Amino acid sequence: MERSQIAVIGAGLMGHGIAYLFAAGGYDVRVQDPARDALDKLTQRSREICDILGTDRAAVERVSTGPSIEWAVSDAGIVIEAAPEKLALKQAIFAHLECFAPRDAILASNTSALPITHIAASLETKDRMLGAHF
């Protein structure tokens, strides 16, 4: 099944920009972050990117936020994790993603320092895991 939904887990320093890039490319993007403050700032930060780049603000309308990882990844073709660089945190997120993302979804980490093999160490579906540092 071809899926056009993108999920971004983490709305902070990197996550908001990743969400914008996919939305600007025409994809619907679901963003989830446990920090309500980060989600509340997402729309404004996306608008600021549009203003800086001189791009159409319509992309912002393709980004939505929600209450859970399960919601964000339920129909995703690509899931990008953009959480803080803490191995245990990333491993816990990917364990969750493995349970709730469609089996054919690509699971990507935006890590800049942690080895993907360490993040994916306990996953049963390592074949769909990759590094995608923006």
Image: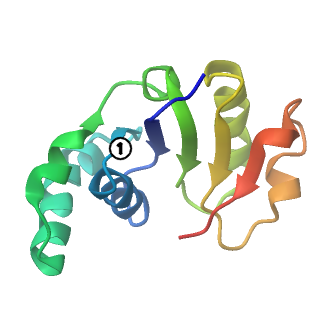
Q: How is the image coloured?
A: rainbow
Which residue lies under the disc numbered 1? Answer: 27
Q: Residue at x 86, y 40 (%)?
A: 126
Q: Name the amino acid type tagged 1.
A: Tyr
Q: How many marks?
A: 1
Q: Residue at x 20, y 70 (%)?
A: 49
Q: Quadrant of the N terminus?
A: top right
36 and 112: which is toward the camera: 112
The quarter of the picture where residue 57 lies is bottom left
Task: Estimate how packed mark 1 is, as few (under 14), some (14 to 19) or many (20 or more) residues with alpha carbons within 10 Å.
Answer: some
Q: Residue at x 14, y 69 (%)?
A: 55
Q: Residue 47: x percent and y percent?
A: 12, 61
Q: Residue 99: x percent and y percent?
A: 70, 20
Q: Residue at x 11, y 62 (%)?
A: 56
35 and 77: which is toward the camera: 77
> Where 31 sits versus 119, above or below?
above
Give the residue furthest to the front: 2
Q: Residue 25: x percent and y percent?
A: 34, 56
Q: Residue 16: x percent and y percent?
A: 34, 58
| Residue 34 as seen in the image, left or right of residue 116 | left
> Where 133 sits versus 81, above or below?
below
The quarter of the picture where residue 6 lies is top left
Q: Secondary structure at mark 1?
A: loop
| Residue 21 as seen in the image, left or right of residue 93 | left
> Where 9 sits versus 84, above or below?
above
> Where 6 sits versus 46, above or below?
above
| Residue 85 as seen in the image, left or right of residue 72 | right
